[in-house]
Amino acid sequence: MKKSDIFLLLAVVLTAALLFAVLFVLLDGTGAVAVITVDGEEYARLPLDTDTVLTVSTDYGTNVVVVKDGKVFVSEASCQDKICINTGNASEMRAIVCLPNKLSVSIEGDE
Amino acid sequence: MKKSACKRLAACGVLAALALTLGYLEQLLPFTVGIYGVKLGLSNLAIVMALYLLDGKSAVVINVVRIIISSLLFGNMLSMAYSLVGGVLSTAVMLLIKRISSLGCVGVSICGGVAHNIGQLCVAMVLVSNLKLAFYLPVLLAAGAVTGFAIGACSLPVINNGYIKMLCDSYKISK
């Protein structure tokens, strides 16, 4: 086995590691968005990488949607049952729904 | 047909059979690291041996034959497309590197492994058309290098074996 062979192996593995780091920085953070709809129509899109608090007040009622640490949840609701608050964080598999206020919060990945 | 050509044909057949068997063996062994597309590529052992013991033309023919037969036996048309692009690219790159650089068979095998994975990734990008697959590139690069290294190191003793070398030299087409 030649020395240059081992150098080649190390070089390729190092390049791969570097490339991975670069791609990670480039592609990460442009991540998912929380899509808020009211009565089936899109109300707002909140990127998950910035913390925000949005008060959604419509004819149906008022909800406070909070984006924090890449998670999105409903902190306050004007409805009776508070199911949306108890749902906790929304995930790509499970949306937050508030039936009385006709509000839903779902997560969409980026494409 | 000359006697040496017949012997060479027979040697190609033996190596093709070896490549097929190694490929099948690999499917039997539960060797997976949990990343789709990363595998040992045992059948590449036979291709590297063919490249060094016989010649480039034989290596290409053996690899194409191996891919077609193994896809017919164990795979489908889609897996054939993936394997053909990866296999042909890897053999071509190995041929080129062997000719133009001073790398030994381990280095050539590393290049082959990397080229194979890049080829497959290109096919996947065309078929799936998702840019997120670029994330796979570094993973496949490293995997190709490591498996290529392993394959090259394993074929080294066979290639350097004096008896096998002598035997195969008599099969080569005399120029």
Image: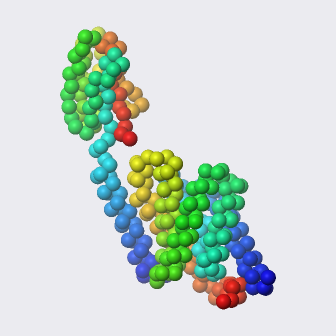
Q: Is residue B21 left or right of residue A55?
A: right
**Residue B163 location (% of width, % of height):** 67, 87
**Residue A110 location (% of width, % of height):** 36, 39
Q: Is residue B138 above or below residue A105?
A: below
Look at 56% across and 79% down and name the residue there.
B156
Look at 79% across and 82% down and name the residue there.
B1
Q: Is residue A89 above or below residue B89?
A: above
Q: Is residue A5 left or right of residue A57?
A: right
**Residue A97 location (% of width, % of height):** 35, 20
Look at 66% across and 70% down and name the residue there.
B61
The residue closer to the viewer here, A61 or B6, is: B6
**Residue B167 location (% of width, % of height):** 70, 86
Q: Is residue B52 above or below residue B27?
A: below
Residue B58 visible within the image: yes
Question: Quarter-wise, where is residue B55 in the image?
Answer: bottom right
Look at 62% across and 60% down and name the residue there.
B26
